[in-house]
């Protein structure tokens, strides 16, 4: 019997904070693993990056939900995301019985990137994923670990770049042929009138982005979900943590992006449901 489809779970903001939402994320990961799902966690942490940058007197500017990044700000991104936030999530999962391993997109050259922005390079040291080299993730999953990935990428010359976490998660989900779950602080993607949208196909996404209904941080989420299902993810979903059931989203919650199958997926080994381990 084939192993169940992996989940790529992207979290950020309050979901990485022990006082506001990290416990709910850990609980979901444990439920999903007990149901037989392998889980890869990709995280942001933009609020903490902004706070640290402010402490250092560095300005913050965003364009279409992506942070303009110079060399000084890239150092802050690496410090906060690959260090503080990544370690916190790894420890929380491991303490709860889901042994976790912290990675960044530099690990095994997991996230190859090209310059992001229009025109390319206009966002500074920000990279747009060109794919994902997921072998290191498969190895960890096969050994029973939960990979936790900070969104930092590298180009063909070894340069280091800040990467939007939604786009990073989408590239990883496509590489694994996974179900992509993008957690946000609203229940679903909304149209220009504020009505929640249950399903978005490619034409719907194009209209939504062109209309300006998707703004700020929702722009990369919608783009990442759409691109992921076009390039290999089985499905994508955008919603809040309250919309999660035992091993994925509730049928009546969030916004779904139906996939076209799993064209980039590699067959996985059988894996029975497992209990949480300490």
Image (cartoon, rainbow, N blue to C red):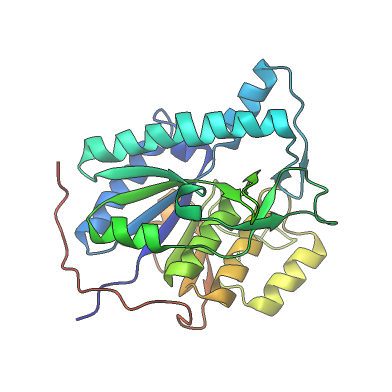
Q: Residue at x 25, y 61 (%)?
A: 142
Q: Nearer the viewer, residue 144 or 24?
A: 144
Q: Nearer the viewer, residue 129 or 211?
A: 129
Left or right for 226, reference 172: right
Picture layout, residue 255 above or below residue 259: above
Query: Residue most toward the front?
Result: 157
Q: Quadrant of the C terminus?
A: top left
The image quadrant of residue 230 is bottom right
Q: Is residue 253 visible?
A: no
Q: Nearer the viewer, residue 83 or 16?
A: 83
Left or right for 180, reference 23: right
Q: Is residue 182 visible?
A: yes
Picture layout, residue 228 above or below residue 27: below
Q: Nearer the viewer, residue 7 or 231?
A: 231
**Mark count:** 0
Q: Residue at x 38, y 55 (%)?
A: 40
Q: Quadrant of the N terminus?
A: bottom left
Left or right for 213, reference 50: right
Q: Residue at x 56, y 69 (%)?
A: 228
Q: Position of residue 153 (x, y in %)?
A: 58, 49
Q: Residue at x 80, y 50 (%)?
A: 121
Picture layout, residue 138 above or below residue 270: above
Q: Position of residue 155 (x, y in %)?
A: 64, 54
């Amino acid at each position: 019997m084939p192993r169940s489809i992996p989940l790529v779970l992207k979290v950020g903001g309050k979901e990485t904070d022990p006082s506001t939402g990290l416990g709910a994320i850990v609980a979901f990961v444990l439920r999903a693993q007990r149901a037989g799902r392998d889980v890869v966690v990709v995280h942001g942490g933009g609020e903490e990056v902004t706070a640290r940058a402010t402490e250092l007197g560095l300005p913050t500017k965003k364009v279409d939900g992506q942070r303009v990044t110079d060399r000084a700000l890239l150092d802050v991104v690496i410090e906060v995301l690959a260090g503080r936030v990544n370690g916190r999530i790894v420890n929380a999962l491991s303490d709860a019985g889901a042994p976790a391993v912290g990675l960044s997109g530099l690990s095994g050259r997991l996230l190859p990137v090209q310059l992001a922005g229009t025109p390319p390079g206009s966002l500074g040291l920000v990279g747009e994923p060109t794919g994902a080299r997921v072998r290191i993730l498969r190895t960890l999953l096969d050994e029973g670990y939960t990979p936790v990935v900070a969104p930092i990428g590298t180009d063909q010359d070894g340069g280091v770049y800040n990467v939007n976490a939604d786009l990073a998660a989408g590239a990883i989900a496509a590489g694994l042929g996974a179900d992509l779950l993008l957690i946000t602080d609203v229940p679903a993607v909304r149209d220009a009138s504020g009505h929640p949208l249950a399903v978005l196909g490619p034409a719907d996404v194009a209209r939504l982005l062109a209309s300006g209904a998707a703004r700020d941080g929702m722009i990369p989420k919608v783009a990442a979900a759409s691109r992921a299902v076009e390039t290999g993810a089985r499905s994508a979903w955008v919603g809040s943590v309250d919309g999660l059931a035992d091993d994925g989203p509730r049928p009546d919650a969030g916004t779904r992006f139906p996939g076209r199958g799993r064209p980039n997926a590699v067959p996985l080994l059988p894996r029975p449901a497992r209990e949480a381990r300490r």
